Structures are given as structure tokens and as C-alpha cells.
Image (cartoon, rainbow, N blue to C red):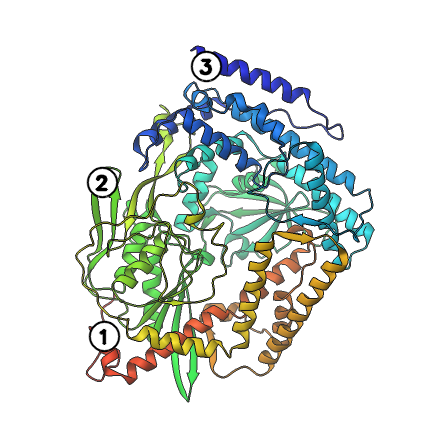
Amino acid sequence: MKKQMMLVTLVLALSAQVGAAQTDKSAAPPPPMKPLAQQTQAALWASRVLSRYHYKAMPLDDAMSEKIFDRYFKSLDSEKLFFVQADIDRFAPVRSKLDDAINSEDLSAPFAIYNLYQQRFEERMAYARELLKTKFDFTQDESYQLDREKAAWPKNDDEVRDLWRKRVKNDWLRLKLAGKEDKSIRETLDKRYESYVTRSRKLNSEDVFQIFMNAYAMSIEPHTNYLGPRASENFDIAMRLSLEGIGAVLQTRDEYTVIREIVPGSPAGLSGKLKVGDRIVGVGQGDSGPITEVLGWRIDDVVQLIRGAKDSTVRLDILPADAGPDAKHTVLALVRKKISMEEQSAKKSVIEVRENGIKRRIGVISLPTFYQDFDARRRGDKDFKSATRDVSRLLGELKKDKVDNVLIDLRNNGGGSLNEAVDLTGLFIDKGPVVMQRNAEGKVDTESDTNAGLAWDGPMGVLINRGSASASEIFAAAIQDYGRGLVIGEGSFGKGTVQTLIDLNRFGGSDKARFGELKMTVAQFFRINGGTTQLRGVTPDIKLPAMSDTENFGESSYDNALPWVSIKPANYTPTGDLKDIVPLLDKKHEARVAKDKDFQYLQDDIALVIKQRKDNQLSLNEAVRRKERDAQDARAKAREKRLIAQISNPADDLVVIPDPKDVKKAAGKTAKQQIAAVKGALRTDDGLQGDERALSTELDAETAAKSAKDVLLNETARILADEVSLIKGDTRLAAKVLPYATDTKGAPATATTAK
């Protein structure tokens, strides 16, 4: 009790200091944020679960408090641009007492820290806007540090002001190099900095609590997180790939909620009365409920009003895209329906590779996440949404397309359902262990494919990158350990842990409790060969250029990641042996890319990014920056010229055939439009942020980026085409690569048994 009273006294004193330091007179700052009773209870219950049941259970004590303290400040100000060292020192008395704050259900201290952060944020933005009234000297030889995450906290106000002077100067110089005049630059940046403040003032106590609780959870282990009630709902939607609403993707622009995309076949799409760019200024419930004005609202608050029960009615007060702010509004009533997020579902295409008059067809399945509708599956719904089901269906379609090889593209697939990873592997193997799990007590369980037969028994490959994590690594590792297919790309993320969701509401004692959820690490997974993907990830059989910053992205970048360990291998029999074919394919790959201009462009880009990352400095001298920009423009123009020539005279060695559904969407695209897309994809820095560009410009750029040539995917297709040629030309190789699926001539047999 004495320790708790000391904590309360310290927080009251610190809060008084924060209040006394308020200096921003330009606008009324928001009132200090305070914790809610349900949040203090949620923190207590979360701490009890984490300290007892986590895979790496650690007590909530003074040592943990110090870790939480450091991580919380880092979460609020990762680039060290707002706090100064004196601010950190001011809160030093509570550094080892955040454990007491949680246990005593008194979160005054973390909220006092956040309130000081909000004050510092507004002070820095006010200073940035003041700097816009001055004149910058771009002939000086000084530089701006790009990444300050590992820098020390600024010693004092003079040091932090100098950091902001350089940041604003860099923002100005970017716009100046893009051809903007001083008046336009000043207006753009003033509006930008003002919008930063506006957005920060929309944060609420749930946001602050979630930041603090994540500082606690991630101090135990990197993949443990706290999800507030709203974040928990969004996580569930992301896993099941469906929601109940109107089928419109929204975005905030100039305080308006703007329609960015309309889902085909949704209530919004079928109405024919909504279009991209329309602004939602009010939302009403039912046929006659009052309209609530939403101008200036947070986007998630607007979304919460628009979502609702299936078959219920929502009314939208719409300001048309091309209308002025005082134009006539229209009110549109829509009946909510179940919306499938098809853009995040598995998709297929076919790449035809032609060499020496021989054509090989590579079926590509892109899988963004390992999704599953858990609730629908628990209810016994036979048609529950599942990544494996979708991939199985696409494999059936690819067989009808008579493809020679199948590629599963898992680039930037951060994982999802472990069950889906096991089931997906089962589409390519005929029974057997897929992954092993070890819990905190050391008990090892094996997850196996128990269904006989394969959906695809021909040659296959898996394309990964640093963004391929968790379930992606389970799948890629199993395919590799079985010798079932080639793993191509760059080393994966290195996440070898299993998480489960713990509903904290069950500790609340009532149905109205809103405590949120814990996504908590409960096990470590192991490859069937006994190793783990933890820290090391999956090493590809054939390596492609690495585009990621491995020092700052991936499991090895975390200071508290679990170590790499190994256990006894599972009892399994490899279904193929690729060690003889990999060197042959790698040799052909190296010879080909040495002459491939597009591949060389990509390698040049990667080299430039690596250099910039290493230098970690941008010159603020206009002459130096113009020289750099001219070099970038020259590279872009050379590439643009080459791509335009390819549009006019397409290469005959490789043809991409998209899914017919996607062809329908892109029907009527002329060569002129394709050229415009190329120019958009190669756009040089215009100094603007996304919401500062016209919505149409931003959408065109995104479309261009999606349609731009995927050099790595194309080269992967060529590697798999080479594999088919080698297998068909060498009975010995065929028998090794596909011993269970080859006929007497060494050609891949046709898969007949589908899951």
C-alpha cells in the first residue's frame, strides 16, 4: 500500500508539471486523456494471463516495468522527434513502478506520459508551421538524417528544434525539386502539418491504452499483442474475409469521408447511385432514424456507423464528388449485406514461357494471407471461407488450363491460420506430418495432413520474400523438407511461434464487458526435419535479389526474439529429391539474368536503396539534390522507353494470361492507357503525400503499380519452365523430382485425386 501511495503522489506531481508547461496558444489543446475503469481492469486481467500462460511467461515486476517504460516511449516517439531527454528524466521516478500501476488498477502514469507526448507533438507542429514563414538557404552543405530510431534523445529544445528545421527544409526542398512555387509549397506544408495535429487530436483513450498495453505485451515477446475491442473486431474481419455492410472502401481526405472504391455486386455497387470520390457527410440508421453528421470524424468511427446487421438499412447523406461544399446533398438508403473481401482472396493467372519453339504453361496462385472463417467453421457451415478451399478450386481450374507447373506466390503473406497452412500443404502431399508444436511445458504435438490424395501432383514451386512469415513459412518449409517443390526468392521473415486469441471479456463478470483480446504466443513451431524457422526463416533453394532491410525488418531485428533451437525430427519420408536439379536450374537462371535488362534495372534499384539506407542522410543542398534527381529521372526515362517499346512490340518469350474475371475488369485497355500506366508506375518524387494528390491520380498510380511488370515473378516462371523441360528430357531427374507422379517416360503424370 505504501508503494501504491508513492506512485499516486509521483503521478500527481508529474501531471501538475505537464499542465504547467502548456505553451501552445494558437488553438485550444484537447483535454488531458484519462483511463477508463474498464481499461484498468483489462490491464490487470491481461497481466495475470500473460504472466502465467505465455510461452515465455515472465513476471510483472520492476524489471518488466523498466522494459515497458522504454518500449512505451519508443512506441510514442520512435524517431525521437518530439520528446527531449528532460522529458524522459521527468518520468524516471515511475520507470520501475508501472507494474504497480497495473496491479493497483491505476494507469495515471502511462496516460500522463501520453498527455505530455500530445503536448510536445503540438509544440513541434506549431514550430514547423512557424518555420514556413522563414526563408531557407539551400546552398548550405548540411544533411537530414532519414532514420533516427537508434539515435539518442535530443538533449534539449535547441537540438530538437534544429531537427525540425531540417525536416521542414527537406519537405520544402522535395516540393521545390518537383517544380512547385514558394507560395504553393508554403500552403501545402502548412495544411499538412495542420492535418497532423487534427488527426492526433482524434486519438482516444482506447488508442492510448492499446499503445501502452502493446508496450507491455511486446516487452515479453515480439508477436504478443493487445487488441482493443475495435481492433479485435477488425482482426476477425481480416481472418474471415467478410463483413456486413454496404461494400465501399472509405478514406479520409480534407476532413471528408470519401468513397475510394466500390465492391462490385455489393449494395453500394448495385445501387448505381454511388461513385468513387463521393463524400459521406452524414449517416442515419433505419428508414427514418436521425442523420448523424460525420464531417471531421475518424474514419473508423464512420465505418462503425455504416456497418451493421445483415438486411438492416443505413442511410447516407452524400455530397457528390464533383460538387462544391455548398452543393445539394442526396440521401441514399442501402440495405446491408454480407460483403466478401475478394481482393484479399487467392487468385490465379497463367504465365506462358516460350523457348526454342516450346511452350510451357506456369499456373500462378497468389495467396495474400492464410484466411479462415473460424466462426462459420465452428457453426458447421459447409461453405465456410477458407484459403485452402479457394486454392483447391483454383488448382482444379489450372488443371483444365493444362498448366505444366504450379507456383504458390506467398510474397508478403504474413501468415494467418495454422490449420490452413497444414491443410494447404495437404493439397500437395499424400498424408504425413507438416509441422510440430512445442508448448511451454515442453510437450510436442505433430500437426499432420490426414487426407489421402493430392489436388496437384505435378511439379510445383513456392515464391517467398522477407515478408513471408509464420503460416507461410510452415507451408514453404514443409514443401522444402518433403522435396516436393522448389522454394524460390529471398529468405523469409523468421517467425517460428504460434499465437492464440484470449478473450478478456470472459473475466469481466458481465455480457457488457469490453476488455478486448490478447493475441498471445503459446507455442513454438518446428519443421518436420527438427529445425525451426525462428530467427533463420526459410532459405530458398534458388535465391532472387533481396529487397528488404534485414537489419530492421524480420525476426532477427527484434531484441527479445526467441532463440533458434531444434528438436527430434518427425517421422516422415521425402517425396522427392531436388538436389540434382537445383544446380542446373540455378546455372540457367544466372546466365539468363546476366543478359536480362529488366533484372539489371531491378538490381540497380536495390543497390541504390541499400546505399541510401547505409548512408542514412539526405543532402539539403539544392545543387546536390538536383544532380541526384536528374540521375533518377534519366534512369526512369530509359526504363520508360524500354517498357513502351515492349508494349508496342511485346516479347514473345513470355505471356501473362490473367484470370478471365480480371480480364473482364481490365477490358478495353488501349496501348495509350498502358503507356500512361507505365509512366505512372515510374513516377518520380513529387514531394506530396497520398491524400495531397487528387484521388484519381492516386488510384491511377496504384493501378499502374499493380499492372507494372513483375520481374521476380516472371523470372520465377522461367525457372519453373526450365524445371519442366529438364524433367521431360531426363527420366532419371524426373524419377527423383516426382517419383510418385511420373510415367515410364519420365513425364509428370496427371493428378487425379483432389482434396
Name the residue furthest bottom.
357
Quarter that holds the N terminus: top left
Visible residue check, residue 675 = yes
Q: Nearer the viewer, residue 639 or 694?
A: 639
Residue identified by numbered label 2: 442
Q: Which residue type does callout 2 highlight?
A: Gly
Query: In the picture shown, does residue 722 fall above or below 700?
Result: below
Badge 2 crowding class, 10 Å Cα cut-off, few under 14, some 14 to 19, many 20 or more, is: few
The image shows residue 100 at horizontal and vertical percentages of 43, 20
For the residues labelled 2 and 3, say whether their Cβ atoms are less than 8 Å apart. Answer: no
The image shows residue 91 at horizontal and vertical percentages of 56, 24
> Alpha-carbon distance for marks 2 and 3?
37 Å
Residue identified by numbered label 3: 4
The image shows residue 483 at horizontal and vertical percentages of 26, 66
Quarter that holds the C terminus: bottom left
**Tag 3's secondary structure?**
helix
**Tag 2's secondary structure?**
loop
Which badge, 2 or 3, is on the more N-terminal residue? Answer: 3
Left/right placement of residue 7 relative to residue 498 reads right
Left/right placement of residue 306 relative to residue 122 reads left
Name the residue furthest top.
2
Query: In the picture shown, does residue 403 fall above or below 172?
Result: below
The residue positioned 44% from the left and 51% from the top of the image is 554
Residue identified by numbered label 1: 736
Which badge, 3 or 1, is on the more N-terminal residue? Answer: 3
Query: In the picture shown, does residue 609 fall above or below 299?
Result: below
Q: Nearer the viewer, residue 545 or 243?
A: 545
Badge 1 crowding class, 10 Å Cα cut-off, few under 14, some 14 to 19, many 20 or more, is: many
**Tag 1's secondary structure?**
helix
Q: Which residue type does callout 1 highlight?
A: Lys
Visible residue check, residue 513 = no
Name the residue furthest left.
571
